[in-house]
């Protein structure tokens, strides 16, 4: 479960970082901690992403990664969109002004 979640989030990162013309990473930071990690980066096309995660003990045999973060991108319409999200044992929960609430 943990791995699946991580892979899902990494794929999102890779999509956002996918090569448009000459998009370059202009800033990047990351840190791996004993019980989690965090990273952030910005690209020259105005996209940004940051994410942090810590491991939470749910029980003696069960841990869940508590992930939160946000990403910002400039859409084809020229508008800047930001999505913040959390992902944990309850699933992936994005929030953004342009995302309809359910
Ligand atoms: C990652 O966490 C460390 C320790 O809490 C903090 O100093 C650093 O600024 C964080 N980096 C990012 C990219 O969030």
Image (cartoon, helix red, strand yellow):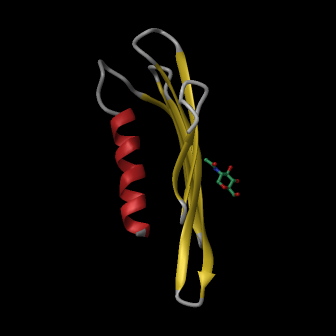
Identify whether 87 is placed above or below 29. below
The foreground one among 25 and 70 is: 70
Identify whether 83 is placed above or below 62. above
Residue reaching furthest top?
Answer: 77
Rendered image quadrant of residue 52: bottom right
- Residue in view at x 39 percent, y 43 percent: 12
The foreground one among 26 and 13 is: 13
Identify whether 81 is placed above or below 91. above
Residue reaching furthest bottom?
Answer: 60
Identify whether 47 is placed above or below 15. above
Give the x, y percent position of residue 98.
55, 24
The number of numbered discs placed on residues in the rendered structure image is 0
- Residue in view at x 55 percent, y 61 percent: 90
Give the x, y percent position of residue 87.
54, 55
Rendered image quadrant of residue 88: bottom right
Give the x, y percent position of residue 76.
39, 13
Any part of residue 32 in sight: no
Rendered image quadrant of residue 75: top left
The foreground one among 6 and 34 is: 6
Any part of residue 13 in sight: yes
In the rendered image, the quadrant that contains the N terminus is bottom left
- Residue in view at x 42 percent, y 60 percent: 5
Give the x, y percent position of residue 3.
38, 67
Residue reaching furthest front?
Answer: 102
In the rendered image, the quadrant that contains the C terminus is top right
């Amino acid at each position: 479960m943990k791995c699946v979640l991580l892979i899902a989030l990494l794929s999102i990162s890779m999509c956002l970082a996918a090569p448009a013309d000459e998009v370059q990473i202009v800033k990047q930071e990351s840190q791996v901690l004993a019980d989690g990690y965090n990273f952030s980066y910005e690209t020259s096309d105005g996209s940004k992403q940051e994410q942090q995660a810590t491991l939470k003990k749910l029980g003696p045999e069960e841990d869940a990664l508590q992930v939160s973060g946000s990403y910002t991108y400039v859409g084809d319409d020229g508008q800047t969109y930001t999505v913040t999200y959390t992902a944990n044992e309850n699933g992936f929960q994005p929030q953004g002004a342009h995302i309809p609430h359910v």
